[in-house]
Amino acid sequence: MSTIEQQVLALSAELNPDSRKQQRLRDLTSHDLDTEHLITMAVKEGLVCLLYKNLKQSGGLNPFSKDQRKRIELLYHQTAGFNLRLIYDLREVLRRLNQNKIQVVLLQGIVLLQKVYKDVGLRPMTDIDLWVLERNYPRLTDILVSSGYRKDRLYPNTYRKGATTLDLHTHILGGERIKARSMLFTKSQDHIYADTRVINFEGHQALCLSPYDQVLYLGLHALKHNINRLMWLVDIKGLLSNWNRSDWKALMDRAKEMGQEKSLSCIFFLLRHLLDFYPPEEVRQFLERDRLGFLTKRLLEQRIKKDLLPVWAPFFLFSPGKIGLGSLTFIFETLFPRKEVLRQVFADFPDLKVWQLYWMRLVQLLVTAKMSLKKS
């Protein structure tokens, strides 16, 4: 049984709640509410700005103290200010890229601000993700360096300028970092790039994913990160909210074509249980054909109960569908990635030798496995 705080947070994860849901929010906040715990949960899940907006609109802020109201209002305004800065800096980068005829695909939050959220203060962001073809990568980085961006010491595909961080990808799923991720799709990423669309971003040209690839990509991104932020599910729900029957059919066809029935099943399982979102009946029937395995379901249920997932969870949530050499390679590389990646994982210990890095990784895996067994 979910707590009142969890119910309030789930109802607050709405971009445009109707009068019925606003009334439900008022009813829930009239109960004995642990407002401090609710704020902590909302910050962790990336939903504190949505919480502030929807509680303010519904008249549900009464249980919060004056200091708490000021705090969440300040977080909303800080988010808006930071996002505006990212938008300004990206606009300048795109201006130079357009001049040099270099195309980039905008991924994740930055494109969703325009397409889904509308309000610049609702969706917290930390960086801007850009997907660029490998042949254009050197020219892109030259332009960034000449514009004042500097390469991060630990993350070679990350460039920073002041508070703005650009995370560059030559493979949409980070295959340049974990090479086995290129096996996740049954077709090459060229098929995804071929379906990208030109958009106008603040007066400059950029590319974005097709709506169906956007959903698949956001789902895989959430699973890759153990779904540790509810915000990523809200992103997907926002994209799906006004779809018609033909859109749903196109998504199912694309999922089958790219081998993503399982990942999509995971996402809709979570959407149903965490955000009370149900796709059309024919979509549910399609997803049930690829039933989730016992351990996969247990992991998803663990997330629904608000527990963090172990670091090995991507074996079951974010892996090639069929067991074979590809999936075994993916599992091994996810467990024990290259030393450069492990140095990023254990950034607080820069002087470790290679064997020490892998020893620490083994200990990390064993500890999280033991914790998961205790919880089960």
Image (cartoon, helix red, strand yellow):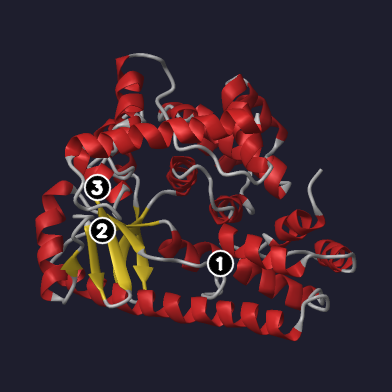
- Above or below, 51 against 190 in this view is below
Query: In terms of image quadrants, where is residue 326?
Result: top left
Residue 117: which numbered mark, if any?
1
**Secondary element type, mark 3:** helix
Q: Is residue 292 visible?
A: no
Report the residue marked by disc 2.
104
CA–CA distance in space, label 3 to label 1: 36 Å
In this orientation, which residue lies closer to the viewer: 8 or 87?
A: 8
Percent coordinates x, y for residue 155 in the rendering:
23, 55
CA–CA distance in space, label 2 to label 1: 22 Å
- Which is closer to the viewer, label 3 or label 1? 3
In this rendering, position of residue 56 left or right of residue 355: right
Q: Is residue 257 visible?
A: yes
- Above or below, 57 against 369 in this view is below
Residue at x 77% of width, y 60% of height: 8
**Marks 2 and 1 close (CB-CB < 8 Å):** no
> Count the marks: how many?
3
In this orientation, which residue lies closer to the viewer: 356 or 95?
A: 356
Residue at x 27% of width, y 34% of height: 358
In this rendering, position of residue 337 left or right of residue 5: left
Percent coordinates x, y for residue 290 in the rendering:
57, 21
Query: Label 1 sits on what residue type?
Result: Tyr
First along the sequence among labels 3 and 1: 1
The residue furthest top is 324
Report the residue marked by disc 3.
343
Query: In terms of image quadrants, where is residue 188?
Result: top left
**Secondary element type, mark 2:** loop
Query: Label 2 sits on what residue type?
Result: Val
Instruction: Report crowding for label 2: few under 14, some 14 to 19, many 20 or more residues within 10 A (C-alpha).
Output: many
